[in-house]
Image (cartoon, rainbow, N blue to C red):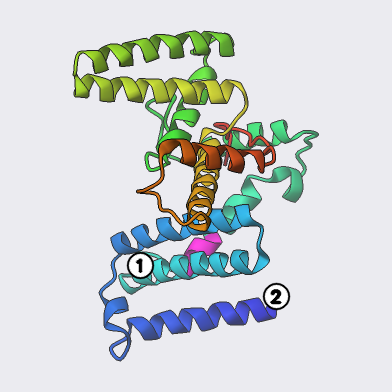
Amino acid sequence: MKKSSQLLEDLQGIIQKLRGPEGCPWDRKQTPRDVKTYLTEELYELLEAIDSENPRELAEETGDILFMILFLTNLYEEKNRFSLAEALESAKKKMIHRHPHVFGSVQVSTADEVMTNWHKLKEKEGKRPKTSHLDGIPGNLPALSRACRLTAKAAEVGFDWEDARGVLTKIAEETSELAGAIDRGKIDEASDEIGDLLFCLVNLSRHLGVDPEQALRRTNEKFTARFHHIEQGLKKRGTSLKEAPLSEMDELWEEAKGREGSPGKTRCPTVKAR
């Protein structure tokens, strides 16, 4: 633990030197808005490392996230907005307050009870009053994840399909409306219908307990791997993507499919996520 604390201080020192008069011109010009962009990129790299389960990659990407957090904190410390100590103290107090079953005398027996208490305690912490039942869902979430959280939140008050079959019927209806917009050449309408169709597919995912964001990420990776197989297969045959007929690419695509295993299901995040 002492080694980690020392390394944390060392990293803070590096950031302060980078931002100092004799530091790096590029680092000195960075703003919180810039860091917001980099932090988002680093977060997705960390998510990719988690999927790979490669310890070296995980350590590197976690370090990058910690660096960006410290860099952002330093920017606000320079403006006397808040300090790292204040941020850590806030997190410490919050975690102790929201875990009375660990640091107090409250008794719980299930994870669901923990989450129920968690949300009750959040409401007592002086958070901004809710004006809508949908409040609390970050607007910057990836669209698929946000749609899943929105529909789950609405389902809490009974605004939901009775089962997955009802969503399937709605998907068929939205698909028909999309086809009509395409037939009429109405691109703006088609855009709206595509959004509606995607929203319905997210709803179906939630009903099945599948995280749509992770499901699409897996499909993206699957497509990438299969397309790479096509490229490599064509190269071995002495041809290229531009020269090969679709039938030959389809043959290699099916060959790649035959080599794959069956991925597991990733649960859809619920609105109770902290």
Question: Would residue 85 be visible to someone looking at this image?
Answer: no
- Decide whether residue 248 is among the magenta residues: no
> Magenta span covers which residues?
84-89
Which quadrant would the N terminus be assigned to in this image?
A: bottom right
Q: Report the residue at 53% width, 83% height from top.
A: 10
Given the image, on which type of amino acid does mark 2 rest? Met
Q: Position of residue 51 (x, y in %)?
A: 61, 52
Marks 1 and 2, how far apart at CA: 26 Å
Residue 46 badge: none
Which quadrant would the C terminus be assigned to in this image?
A: top right
Question: Would residue 20 be visible to someone looking at this image?
Answer: yes
Q: Where is residue 14 in the image (x, y as percent from the top left)?
A: 45, 83
Q: In this view, does 107 lie to the left or right of 70?
A: right
Given the image, on which type of amino acid does mark 1 rest? Tyr
The residue under label 1 is: 76
Q: What element carries label 1?
A: helix
Q: Report the residue at 62% width, 51% height from top.
A: 95
Q: Where is residue 27 in the image (x, y as percent from the top left)?
A: 32, 77
